[in-house]
Image (cartoon, helix red, strand yellow):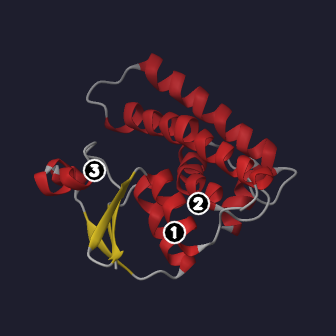
C-alpha cells in the first residue's frame, strides 16, 4: 500500500494526479500545512525538510520506502508503474529537462508571486513586480514550446503532471484572457 501525505497545493496535487493516472492503490493523508502539521515529529520522520508531499511505499514486504519532493515522487511512481516516463535516454532527457524547469522556475516563481501578492503581511511592490514579470516569462516559455508540441516531452509524461497545477494557477492569476493560447489549450487537454 502507498501512503500519500499531501495538502491542497500545486505541489501536493502532483502525486495525486500520477497515482490516479496509474490507477495505483493509495491512502491519502491530509497534512494541514496551515496548522503546521508538517512540522510534527511523525511527518518529519518521513520528510526531514518538513514539506508536502511525501509518500511511503509499504508494499515491499515489511520494508517501508519514504520518498519526498514532488519530482522524486513522480519518478518513483513512474518507474514503479512503468508509465509516463520514457525509457530511452533520448526521450527521457527532455522529460527530465522540463521537470527540472518546473522545479527551478515555474513553481518557485509563481509561488513567490502568489506569496508576495496575496499572503505577505507587508506589500513589497518590487517583489510583486519581480515575481510577476518572471512568472509571466516562464509561462511564455511553456506557451512557446507548446505552440509546436501537444505535450512538454513528446507524449503525456510526468513532466506535464509536474507543470499542470502551477500553470493552471499562473494562467488564473497572471494572464489576461487570450494570452498564452497554447498553454491554455494544454491545461484544458490535461
Residue pointed to by mark 3: 47
Position of 94 with respect to 25 (left or right) is right
Q: Position of residue 142 (x, y in %)?
A: 72, 44
For the residues bearing labels 2 and 1, Cβ distance under 8 angstroms:
yes
- Location of residue 141 with respect to 93 vertically, above or below: above
Q: Give the residue drawn at x 56%, y 74%.
A: 81
Residue pointed to by mark 1: 17
Position of 110 with respect to 53 (left or right) is right
Q: Give the residue drawn at x 53%, y 41%.
A: 103
Q: Camera-side residue: 92 or 170?
A: 92
Comes first in the chain, label 2 or label 1: 1
In front: mark 3 or mark 1?
3
Q: Camera-side residue: 123 or 51?
A: 51
Q: How many other residues sit within 10 Å of disc 2, few (<14), some (14-19) or many (≥20)? A: many
Q: Where is residue 114 in the image (x, y as percent from the top left)?
A: 43, 39
Marks 2 and 1 sit apart, C-alpha to C-alpha, by 7 Å
Position of 145 with respect to 82 (left or right) is right
Label 2 sits on a secondary structure element that is: helix
Q: Residue furthest left?
A: 41
Q: Is residue 173 in sight in this rendering? A: yes
Label of residue 161 in the image:
2
Q: Give the residue drawn at x 53%, y 22%.
A: 130
Q: Give the residue drawn at x 61%, y 60%.
A: 158
Amino acid at each position: 500500500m502507498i501512503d500519500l501525505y499531501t495538502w491542497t497545493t500545486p505541489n501536493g496535487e502532483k502525486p495525486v494526479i500520477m497515482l490516479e493516472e496509474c490507477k495505483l492503490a493509495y491512502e491519502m493523508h491530509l497534512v494541514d500545512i496551515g496548522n503546521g502539521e508538517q512540522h510534527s515529529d511523525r511527518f518529519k520522520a518521513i520528510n526531514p525538510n518538513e514539506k508536502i508531499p511525501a509518500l511511503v511505499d509499504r508494499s515491499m514486504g515489511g520494508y517501508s520506502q519514504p520518498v519526498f519532493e514532488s519530482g522524486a515522487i513522480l519518478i518513483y511512481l513512474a518507474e514503479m508503474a512503468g508509465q509516463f516516463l520514457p525509457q530511452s535516454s533520448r526521450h527521457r532527457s527532455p522529460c527530465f529537462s522540463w521537470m527540472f524547469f518546473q522545479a527551478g522556475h515555474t513553481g518557485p516563481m509563481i509561488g513567490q508571486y502568489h506569496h508576495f501578492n496575496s499572503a505577505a503581511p507587508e506589500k513589497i511592490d518590487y517583489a510583486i513586480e519581480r515575481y510577476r514579470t518572471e512568472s509571466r516569462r516562464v509561462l511564455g516559455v511553456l506557451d512557446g514550446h507548446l505552440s509546436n508540441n501537444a505535450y512538454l516531452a513528446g507524449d503525456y509524461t510526468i513532466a506535464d503532471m509536474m507543470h499542470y497545477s502551477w500553470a493552471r494557477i499562473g494562467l488564473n492569476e497572471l494572464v489576461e484572457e487570450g494570452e498564452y493560447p497554447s498553454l491554455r489549450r494544454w491545461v484544458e487537454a490535461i
